[in-house]
């Protein structure tokens, strides 16, 4: 089967911000929206860009841009997103030195923020995040801890439980029965264990 290039989005990644030379900016990842209508990209200039795929020869440019702050650690689409229902069109991000932000995928505005604090009441940033399959919660991984936020209650209220070390990846299984937590040590940055947690216990 032959593969053909349908469209390309290049200009916004080759012309970086004033603090960077064009050769310094690069893509870190791209995620399709759950309904398959748009793409979300993450790049080294710390901007999330929303693209509406075009099937023409005209190069694509982003329809919206989101500015989470510093280095973006993780980002995720709302799992029940449907472009026909604006209330469901949102995404979450976490970045260095900032709380988790919930963004409106229609306007680019920030809808809400979810904040975590350490034992000294200092703000801490999530290293990873995901939504639960029903879209009711944001599950976020921190240094030796996982926190669960109610999407309808922005702020600092959350439940939490401890992990062995930093939680670099959190996701639900295809059966929605368990949460998979991928941890990394500081030894050469390699993955060293996989925790499988019963969701019925750690909801």
Image: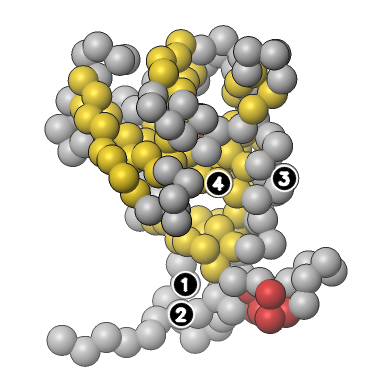
Q: Is residue 85 above or below residue 189?
A: above
Residue at image coords 72%, 45%: 69
Kindly check if marks 2 and 1 are in contact, taking CB atoms under 8 A apart as contact.
Answer: yes
In front of the other: 188 or 129: 188
Residue placed under numbered mark 1 in the picture = 54
Is 58 situated above or below 143? below
Q: Which numbered disc, 2 or 3, marks the residue closer to the eye?
A: 3
Q: In screen coordinates, is 106 left or right of 145?
A: right
Asked where in the image residue 121 lies, by quadrant, the reply is: top right
- Residue 73 bears which disc, if any? 4
**Would you name the residue on which mark 3 appears?**
69
**Distance CA(mark 4)–CA(mark 2):** 28 Å
Q: Looking at the image, is mark 4 or mark 2 earlier in the sequence?
A: 2
**Rendering coords of residue 119 (x, y %):** 63, 13
Q: Whole-Å distance between the Cαs marked 1 and 3? A: 28 Å
Q: Residue at x 65, y 50 (%)?
A: 71
Identify the residue at horizontal 71%, vertical 48% (top origin): 70
Give the quadrant of the C terminus: top left
Disc 1, SS: loop
In front: label 1 or label 4: 4
Answer whether labels 4 and 2 touch (C-beta < 8 Å): no
Classed neighbour count for the residue bearing mark 4: other residues with Cα under 10 Å, few (<14), some (14–19), many (≥20): some
Spot occupied by residue 109 in the image (x, y as percentages of width and height): 68, 39
Tell me the SS state at disc 3: loop
**The disc label shown at residue 7, or none:** 2
Query: Which-is-in-front pick, marks 2 and 1?
Result: 2
Above or below, 93 against 35 in this view is above
Residue at the farthest right position: 18
Task: Tell whether label 3 touches label 1 (CB within 8 Å).
Answer: no
Residue found at the very far front of the displayed protein = 187
Residue at point 51%, 12% (across, down): 158
Viewer-nearest residue: 97 or 46: 97
């Amino acid at each position: 089967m032959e593969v053909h290039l349908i469209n390309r989005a290049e200009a916004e990644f080759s012309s970086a911000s004033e603090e960077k030379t064009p050769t310094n900016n690069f893509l870190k990842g791209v995620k399709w929206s759950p309904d398959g209508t748009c793409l979300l990209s993450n790049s080294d200039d710390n901007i999330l860009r929303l693209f509406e795929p075009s099937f023409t020869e005209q190069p694509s440019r982003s329809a919206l841009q989101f500015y989470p702050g510093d280095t973006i650690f993780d980002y995720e689409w709302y799992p029940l997103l449907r472009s026909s229902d604006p209330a469901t069109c949102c995404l979450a991000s976490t970045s260095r030195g900032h709380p988790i932000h919930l963004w409106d995928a229609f306007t680019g505005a920030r809808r809400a923020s979810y904040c975590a604090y350490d034992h000294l009441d200092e703000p801490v940033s999530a290293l990873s995040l995901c939504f639960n399959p029903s879209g009711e919660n944001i599950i976020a991984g921190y240094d030796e801890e996982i926190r669960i936020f109610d999407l309808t209650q922005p702020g600092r209220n959350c439940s939490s439980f401890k992990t062995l070390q930093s939680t670099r990846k959190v996701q639900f299984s295809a059966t929605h029965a368990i949460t998979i937590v991928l941890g990394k040590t500081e030894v050469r940055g390699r993955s060293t264990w996989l925790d499988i947690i019963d969701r019925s216990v750690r909801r």
